Image (cartoon, grey):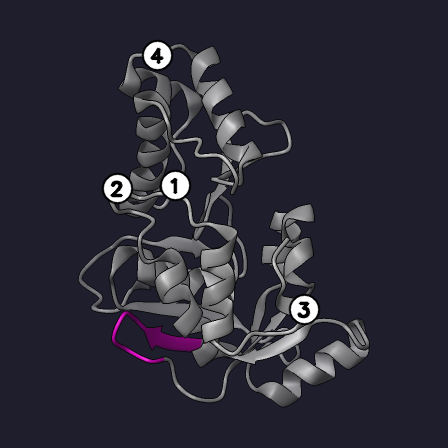
Amino acid sequence: MQENVLNTPLSRRVRDLVYQTFAAQGRAPSLAELAGRTQSTIDSIHQILDDLAHEHALVLNPDRDAVRMAHPFTAAPMAFVVTPADGHDDRRWWGGCAWDSFGISAALHLDVRIDTACPQCGAEIRLVSGPTVTPPAGPTVRFPRPARQWWDDVVGTCTMIRMFCDRDHAEQWTADNDPGGGYVVDATTVWRLAGPWYGDRLHPDFQPHSREFNQRLLDECGLTGPFWELP
């Protein structure tokens, strides 16, 4: 991100309200809600959200009149359900992808239960993970396209970052649906990446990561080579 779009008190407040609402309620605030809470006009909120989306600080829906995603959170149902692991907290979030599901745990500093299904066999995958809880060995995650293409269609990219029962199922799905495409990674590696990538999203002093910072995170997780080169 070349430009800090959080350089005014209002843009900072709007961005933080989006994340706070996702964290507390599992949903995105509406433009009218943001305008009311910041004593601003709908037009000014719309412009701020447009600026934030342009710099990849969040994602708007196709009509650009609502927040679709604020990574790692998503406003619409996708393939993952994330809930607190202790069972005493009734919050619930949609995970946009396997990586974002681990990212929700990292952003909230909360142990969570992740529920999804293997795209190859349809079997239920349920695991507990958290800041200090390593996910079990076995499940793998398939990334559908190289890092340089993620934001060409970020919702489409997230939709296809899926978790499989094991590497064999991920590779068989690839052979049947996208021969030679994608990249399969152990779920534990994705969990390790999600911690520093998303762990500061709710910090009061959050600042967008630089490309160099994020590239270093990928490198430190062993995700190197052309597939993992950020734009």
Identify the residue at image location x=44%, y=14%. Answer: 44
> In this figure, which residue is indicated by the disc labeled 2?
205
Of mark 1 and mark 3, the one earlier in the sequence is 1
Q: Is residue 139 above or below residue 3?
A: below
Which stretch appears magenta? 126-134
Q: Amino acid at mark 2?
A: Asp
Of mark 2 and mark 4, the one earlier in the sequence is 4
Q: Rounded to the nearest whole Å, what is the CA distance between mark 2 and mark 1? A: 22 Å
Of mark 4 and mark 3, the one earlier in the sequence is 4
Q: Is residue 82 visible?
A: no
Of mark 3 and mark 2, the one earlier in the sequence is 2
Instruction: Check whether the beta carbons of the residues at disc 4 and disc 3 lie within 8 A of each other.
Output: no
Identify the residue at image location x=50%, y=68%. Answer: 218
Q: Residue furthest front?
A: 212
> In this figure, which residue is indicated by the disc labeled 4?
40
Neighbourhood count class around disc 2 (C-alpha, 10 Å): few under 14, some 14–19, many 20 upward: few
Look at the image and say whether residue 180 sits in the magenta stretch. no
Neighbourhood count class around disc 1 (C-alpha, 10 Å): few under 14, some 14–19, many 20 upward: many
Give the quarter of the image for residue 130. bottom left
Q: Amino acid at mark 3?
A: Phe
* Label 4 vs label 3, nearer the camera: 3
Which circle marks residue 27 in the picture? 1
